[in-house]
Amino acid sequence: MSADEDGPWAHAVAGLTDAGLLTVTTDGDAVLADDVQYSLRAIDTDDVNLY
């Protein structure tokens, strides 16, 4: 996802970045923050009941 300030997702990307869920790379791409990626990997198993 691009962190372009004029793009259609600019407000959403800015909000997620401010919340610490996304980080912006040096090329201007928005990616999941490291701790979010870690949390998602932790629940990516068959033995976790999400409900």
Image (spheres, helix red, strand yellow):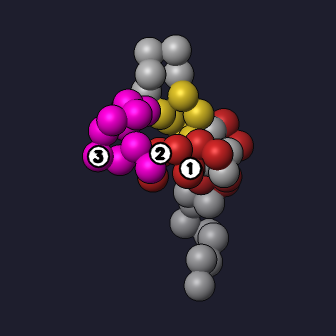
**Disc number for residue 8:** 3
Number of on-image labels: 3
Please give the residue where the numbered disc 2 appears in the rendered image: 13
Quadrant, the C terminus? bottom right
Q: Say whether disc 1 or disc 3 marks the residue closer to the N-terminus.
A: 3
The amino acid pointed to by label 2 is Val
Residue 32 image point, x, y percent: 55, 40
Position of 33 compared to 13: left or right? right
Q: How far apart are the two marked residues, 1 and 3, measured between alpha carbons?
A: 14 Å
Quadrant, the N terminus? top left
Helix, strand, or loop for circle 2? helix
Q: How far apart are the two marked residues, 2 and 3, measured between alpha carbons?
A: 10 Å
Q: How far apart are the two marked residues, 2 and 1, measured between alpha carbons?
A: 5 Å
Residue 40 image point, x, y percent: 59, 53
The amino acid pointed to by label 3 is Pro
Q: Residue shown at 54%/28% (left/top)?
A: 24
Q: Is residue 26 above or below residue 2?
A: above
Please give the residue where the numbered disc 1 appears in the rendered image: 16
**Disc number for residue 50:** none
- Majority secondary structure of magenta residues: loop
Residue positioned most to the left: 8
Q: Say whether disc 2 or disc 3 marks the residue closer to the N-terminus.
A: 3
Q: Answer few, some or many: residues within 10 Å of disc 3's Cα (few below 14, many 20 plus, some between 14 and 19).
A: few
**Label pair 2/3, CB-CB below 8 angstroms:** no
